[in-house]
Amino acid sequence: MLTHHRDGFTLIELLISIAAMGVVIFYTLGTFTVQHQTYVVVDQVSETQNNGRAISSLIERDVRNAGYMVPSAAAACGADGSTTADTLAISDTDAIKPVHELPLSLQGEELGVSTSTTPSAGATTLTVSDLLVDDTPSYKKNASSSTLDSDFHVDGGAIVVDLANPERGVACGQITAVGSNTITVDFDAVLNAAPGASPPDLLVVPAHYYALNTATTPPQLERDGMILAKDVEDLQVAYFYDSDHDNQATGNEYRGDDGANPYDTTLVDGNDLREIRFNVVVATRDDDPRNPDNSGTGQVRENRTSASAPGDDGKRRRIYTATVRVRNNML
């Protein structure tokens, strides 16, 4: 009589196989998790580095051209914050045609528009002689404009100097409105209130305006109201004023680089500005998944106080620093 024998796994063999498969799956998933976390970190750090380079390149380009065809004293201006980010206004080269394309009557001139209104902190409406500094409009002054009609525009910047009394310093801020012959500017830096011996000769020039918008999440750096990059934590600026004209940074000639020597626009002569040093701190979008609690800490630059910087968190950061000579103020 024939008997049928059927092979199969015993219960013990099946349990051993399941256990072995579980070990393999566990380590395979662990490897995939580590690889994914590494990819996330590398991707975000690369994005941070690219953003920092792009921002720094643009600011450097603007600083190198600062003062082109405008008074040297109006090359740059800013507001110094020890617990907040700085702001920076740089004369707008893009609003001025190349010198060989300017009318002959303007080629030897210091371009700008005149005003008799002294800037004061906060929103100030300046009545100006014109909205064009070179007889050719470069921008739409506001969203309702259908064609180019101004060299000043909403969200751009404006710099004001007193040509007759340069010791009054320099004023600057962001433009909030442009009328037919008026410019409303939210000034965050003003002139020294005491005029010199000569009657004031106020000149206004268009500027690019850099500011950190902390009202957004995450914070973002803006140029003329347009986003340059998100996840920018800080913008800090220092200025070298060669007050003794020896072309060396001595004494308190670098301003805004420490708490004992803040940058104050009412205490400087813009004609003495030689260099601008800026620092951009950029953070990754998310925490490092491999070490989310304390892999990084906020960075302190120039006169920013350590107490106001972000604390330990899981973000990685990159810092970009450049010192740039101002175009029209080189000895």
Image (tube, rainbow, N blue to C red):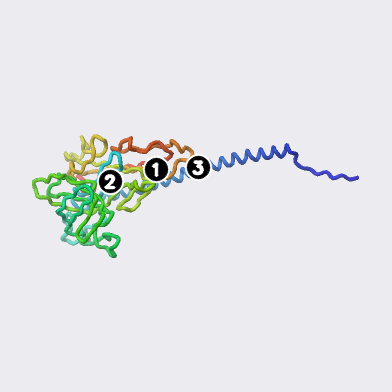
Q: Position of residue 62 (x, y in %)?
A: 28, 50
Residue at left 40%, top 36%? 312
Is the Cβ of the residue at disc 2 closer than 8 Å to that at disc 3?
A: no
The amino acid marked with disc number 2 is: Thr
Give the percent coordinates (x, y) of residue 29.
Answer: 58, 42
- Residue 37 is tagged as 3
Q: Residue furthest right?
A: 1
Cα separation, mark 1 vs mark 2, equals: 19 Å
Direction from residue 3 to residue 210 in the image, left or right: left
Label 2 – label 3 distance at C-alpha: 36 Å
Give the vertical position of 169 relative to 129 (above or below): above
In screen coordinates, is 86 left or right of 52? left
Q: Is residue 160 above or below residue 138?
A: above
Residue 19, position as x, y percentages in the image: 66, 38
Task: Pick whichever of labels 1 and 2 is earlier in the sequence.
Answer: 2
Q: Residue at x 17, y 56 (%)?
A: 127
Name the quarter where the N terminus is drawn: top right
* Location of residue 15 (image quadrant): top right
Q: Tell me the mark number nearer the camera, choosing from 2 and 3.
A: 2
The answer for how far apart the CA atoms under marks 1 and 3 are is 17 Å
- The residue under label 1 is 283
Q: Amino acid at mark 1?
A: Ala
Q: Which mark is residue 87?
A: 2
The residue under the point 71% across, 40% down is 14
Number of on-image labels? 3
* Type of the residue with mark 3: Gln
The one nearer the camera, 218 or 49, is 218
Q: Secondary structure at mark 2?
A: strand
Tell me the quarter of the picture where residue 254 sits.
top left
Residue lying at the far left of the rendered structure: 197
Residue closest to the far bottom: 146
